[in-house]
Amino acid sequence: MKLARAIHFDDSDTRVFHNPARTGEWCISGGFEFSNWTEGDLTGKARQAFSNGWMGCETFGRVSFAAVTQIEPVERDRLADGLARHFVDIYGAPSIDAARGVALEELSQMMELCEDHAPNTLLTVARELTEAGVRESYRVIEAQDAGLEQFAIHGSLDEPHQH
């Protein structure tokens, strides 16, 4: 099973999103957050989150890039529990049990998006508001094109380079 984690190449997400996702947290599309939005809601940092932000499953913040990686079933189940709790707390779902199916569906959609891609493949999302609702499209950047192999194997993006 594969899912994607938030990845940052610089601090731009801290400037463009009200609540940036934490590096390394698991991500989903999170398009449900915008289901009742109108053009009037799309201003400033809110527009940026709508236009191209993945949702982190821990902070519920946004990130521009997500990197595909393996996920274990037990971790997926933990994420579903957290998402279900979020749906109760923020969106008024009647119970965690009632919300868990929706949470699993959100995770499954992201897992399907990630499944055919190699680890470290980068994903971006683009959303637009249409008469039919929110439309999402995805861009895939292969790991070799992004030069990520060195980070995945040799360390993190936060380590200073040694010369």
Image (cartoon, rainbow, N blue to C red):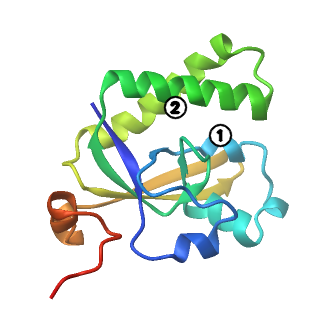
Of the 4 image quadrants, the one containing the N terminus is top left
At which x and y percent is residue 54?
52, 53
- In the figure, is residue 101 to the left or right of 24? right
At which x and y percent is residue 23?
44, 58
Residue at image x 42%, y 67%?
A: 8
Question: Who comes first in sequence, dot 2 or dot 1?
Answer: 1
At which x and y percent is residue 76?
41, 27
- In the figure, is residue 137 to the left or right of 2? right
Residue farthest right in this picture:
40
Location of residue 65 by image quarter:
bottom left
Amino acid identity at mark 2: Glu
Q: How many marks?
A: 2
Amino acid identity at mark 1: Phe
The foreground one among 34 and 135 is 34
Of the 4 image quadrants, the one containing the C terminus is bottom left
The residue pinned by badge 2 equals 106
Location of residue 162 by image quarter:
bottom left
For residue 32, the mark is: 1
- In the figure, is residue 22 to the left or right of 5? right
User: SS at mark 1?
Assistant: helix
Residue farthest bottom in this picture:
163
* Cβ atoms under marks 2 and 1 closer than 8 Å: yes
Residue 132 seen in the current view: no
